[in-house]
Image (tube, rainbow, N blue to C red):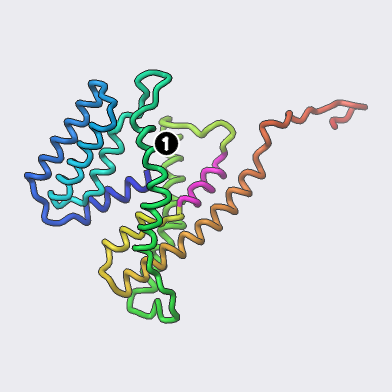
Amino acid sequence: MDDIGAIVVIGLFYSAGVQPWFLGVAAALVVLIVLLKRVGVVWVGAYLVLGAALWSATYASGVHATIAGVVLGLLTPARRPVPSAVSPAERTARLLRPWSSFLIVPVFALANAGVEIRADSLDAPGAAAVTAAVMVGLVLGKTLGIVGAAWLAVRAGLARLPDSATWGMVVAVASVAGIGFTVSLFVAELAFEVGPLQHAAKLGVLAGSAVAAVVGGTALRRACRRTPDPGQPPAVAVRAGGSNL
């Protein structure tokens, strides 16, 4: 959900020169995908072809093409046609996971990180403020946002905490979510031109991710230590000689 929100921001605020005709074609393709889903089409090939067409139309429209990926992902059928079958979403995820984990993400990281840490990295005007803002956004902003959204959902009756889960665990997991990499670096490249400020933003992403990893890992250890092991029998109060033992 966090990445989806970021990609929506990219689509809304980093798109220029929108072409209405191509945008209409993209919208028609979305409608077609929804119709196929409604009639029960589960053939992955159909969604791959339509997905490629949707990406091309979105790109040609001037809207950032990552929006097409988000829309297609949300519309891919996740329900199994029969209990013993595998849904198109599961099948596609299994197919793409090795390529994504071992090729696409590493190549993206090597091509887009490029952070050179020097003594004067933050000397440019505004560089230190950009780095600090990115770090605060990743470490504090994500924690407050996720915990706040979860609390509102529980209070509104829209969701509940999983069994044996505590709010300390929610805070810990929200802290771990501050580890930002691919989308964070992508937004940094779009938000700043090549130069000291983009360099400072990327430095903030890496530093903020490191801090979030330490804070989140520590919080998870503390939260889990306070949670009783479900495999252990509950303590029993034994009365002996008028005293509770």
In percent of the image, x 38 and y 68: which residue is there?
114
At horizontal 27% and vertical 43% (from top left) the residue drawn is 69
| Segment colored magenta | 166-177
Q: Nearer the viewer, residue 101 or 16?
A: 101
Q: Position of residue 28 (x, y in %)?
A: 13, 35
Figure quadrant of the C terminus? top right
Q: Residue furthest top?
A: 82
Number of numbered markers:
1
In this picture, residue 236 sits left or right of residue 139:
right
The residue under the point 63% across, 49% down is 222
Query: Percent x, y for residue 144?
Result: 44, 50
Label 1 belongs to which residue? Answer: 153
Q: Quadrant of residue 140?
A: bottom left
**Quarter of the figure with residue 236:** top right
Q: Amino acid at mark 1?
A: Ala
Task: Name the element at disc 1.
Answer: helix
Q: Choose between 92 and 21: the one closer to the eye.
A: 92
Residue lying farthest left?
A: 21
**Coordinates of residue 126 in the picture (x, y in percent):** 33, 74
* Residue 154, horizontal then vertical, whole percent: 45, 34
Q: Residues within 10 Å of mark 1 (few under 14, many from 20)?
A: some
* Residue at 32% over, 62% down: 188
The part of the image, by quadrant, that contains residue 122 is bottom left
**Is residue 183 in the magenta section?**
no
Q: Main secondary structure of the magenta part?
A: helix
Residue 32 placement, left or right of 84: left
Q: Quadrant of the N terminus?
A: top left
